[in-house]
Image (spheres, rainbow, N blue to C red):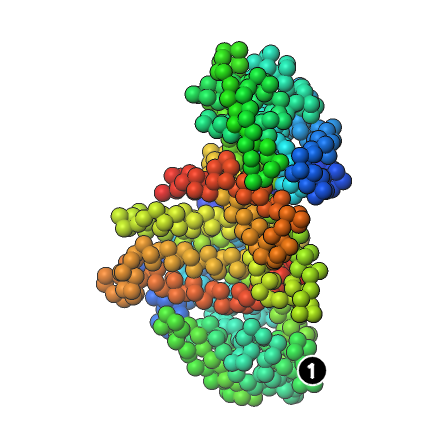
Amino acid sequence: MRFAFTDDQKMLRDTVREVLQRQCAPEVVRAAWEGRPDGVRAVWDTLADTGVIGMTASEEAGGMGMNELDLVLPLEETGYAALPGPVVDTAAVGIPLLEAAGTDEQKERWLGPAVAGEARIVVSFEDQDVVPHAASADVLLAERGGVAFCVPVGEASVIAEKSVDRPRELARVAFESGSQYRMRDDVDTRAQFVLGRERAALGAAAQLVGLSRRMLDMTVQYAKDREQFGKPIGAQQAVKHRLANALIEQEFARPLVYRAGWSMATGAADAHVAVSLAKIYAGQAATFVAKEALQVHGAIGYTIECDLHMWMKRAWALAATHGDAAYHRERVGRHIL
Amino acid sequence: MDLNFTDSENAFRQECRLWLEANAPREPLPSGDTKEGFALHLEWEHALFDAGWAAVSWPKQYGGREATLFEWLIFEEEYYRVGAPSRVTQNGIFLLAPTLFEFGTDEQKERILTPMARGDVTWGQAWSEPNAGSDLASLKSTARRVDGGWRLSGQKTWSTRAAFCDMAYGLFRSDPEQARHRGLTYFMFPLHAEGVTVRGVDRLDGDEGFAEIFLEDVFVPDTDVIGEVHQGWKVAMATTSSERGLSLRSPGRFVATASRLIDLYHRYRDRSDPVLRDQVIQAWMDAQAYRWFTFQTVTRMTRGESIGPDSSMNKVFWSEMDVRTHETALALIGEALELDEGSASAVDGGYWMKGFQFALAGPIYAGTNEIQRNIISERVLGLPRK
């Protein structure tokens, strides 16, 4: 038993952290909110250059052949920065799915560009018509009626919807499920989409931990700086205890997320249960921290001038996506009861 | 990262399991917090010691087997899995011994550890005083310098099982000129000596689990001071994190309680509803969360990191989880929950109500959860003290 990341895994995390610190300050996230995604585009390019976007692709495909455990720390950092864009969709789900189930032609057209950061992949699971980041993506991997499709976004109908977290750029997608889009028929694509969904849930959980950490950092800083009654509000026990509770929720979620990454990477028989625990606890932690953060910020936190809302809204969205707490609790229930 | 146990850890688990399944009492013993039960628990402690299981992580020379921290966690998982008796030697083995290992003299370790592990000399803690609970540094009991030692006077309270124990340990003000955390000394003292009066106090669950200790000029030799004179606060605090964290409540206990809850759920599911079902699942998940959090912490410890104030997060988590788990069990049992131990009709012999009442103490002892939250916010998050 050894519950720790390797130096290489931590180095990759640090690289991503530095890139995001440099290029994805809150103003960049805010610009994406206001429909100016140029800054975010630049971050994407840098992440691709450093190999992060294509990290799960095989080495033949120009990637690093990394697994779900390698993914969790970099993805946690993207949550910390509230990086807008389909990083989980492309890096954690889309690329492995395309590589495993795409035809030679589909891979030829999309895999290299995705790894290079030139094409973005989004994924639509069965019955999921509203897809984040679809409008700005290049290719859609979708499962409909148990059949897998790889559809250039330009050939699909994409009607924008509005997320409470604006940079998620939700859109309702539809396409003609013609044979020209079919993915490989000699591969169990159903199993690949099931695996993709697990990776999506894990990715969301990792980002939720990052979101949570950032909201707590912001709030601790605010509680130290903001003075009332002649002292920092963070000296008040009522405030301290809220933040202590927030930290506990967060810190007990973290190892569950890391363990889920390990369980998926090693193909553990109960990996789906580990993913469910991760998603539940990370979602609960982030939404709880968001609520406490808002309360401690007071009225300023209730404005969109304050950066907090961008993290908070992302947390609400991610906690519910790829299986909300009720869905995952039911999966755990079936396993233990 | 490798979250599988190693072959040797698995072999250790197998050895624990075989011995415990063959030797742990089939029927629960009477509560170890009663006079009768205490004696029966000590017999069990002797058996544990003789087979080398009383203090697995200790050096062999004191009766341990030099188990690693992970092996100790495995032992605890197996111990609670078979439902073996509660450890009446707890306050010695898990609270005093770590202090002795860090600050004790060789003479003290030689004299004290083995009889402690064997259950021949039993130990109670004597931290709190009537007016010094969460604010321990305001304690009033004194130590007066005399030839060859000290004379202790004052009153200690909430001393677990002290009504049945032989010895106790605690802090006394040795330098009357100094205030608060300074000028305190850490003493071990006898409970059956001249000048000591021990009065049992019935706890919430009716057991005589607590005691008050009155000391009037009780002589203690210099050899029963732990660490340096007047440096008792530092000595005591060095090991409080082990009390709050791991050594007091390892995950095995809660994982076992969660399994029992699931068993109860299967028997009472007819009167369950979706809300209760969710709570049962939550209880299981919380125990798992505590388990993985602990494995992460122990990995840090085995690499030589000190855990410090992080242990306050453990304490809040396990103590509040334990209350919720028992509340869920009682909700499943319904109106029969009031049937106390000793009633023929009590569900599981009254185990859940007894456990619930014990769980309610968790957020209070070993530093109330309010104090823990202060520690977390000030020493982990860095919020201002005042």
Which amino acid type is marked by label 1? Gln
Q: Nearer the viewer, residue B355 or A47?
A: A47
* Residue B205 visible in the current orientation: yes
Instruction: Tell me what residue is drawn at x 66 percent, y 56 percent.
Output: A220
Look at mark 1 in the image and give the residue it sits on: B178
Split into 4 quadrants, where in the image is the C terminus of chain A? top left
Q: Is residue A257 above or below residue B160?
A: above
Q: In the picture provided, is A69 more to the left or to the right than B38?
A: right
Label 1 marks a residue whose chain is B
Say which element carries label 1. loop
**Residue visible at 47% across and 80% down?**
B212
Residue at image location 50% in from the left, 40% down from the top: A320
Residue found 53% across the figure and 14% down from its top: A181
Neighbours of disc 1 within 10 Å: few (<14), some (14-19), many (20+): few
Residue at the right extreme?
A22
Q: Estimate the x, y position of residue B265 in percent, counting from the top left.
A: 32, 49
Is residue B325 placed above or below B364 in the rendered structure? above
Quarter occupied by the N terminus of chain A: top right
Which one is nearer the viewer's eye here, A172 or B371?
A: A172
Residue B242 appearing in the image: no
Residue B242 is situated, as x and y percent measured from the top left of the image, at 58, 61
- Front position in the image: A58 or A302: A302
Residue A225 percent across, percent down from the top left: 71, 60
Extreme-left residue of the structure = B344
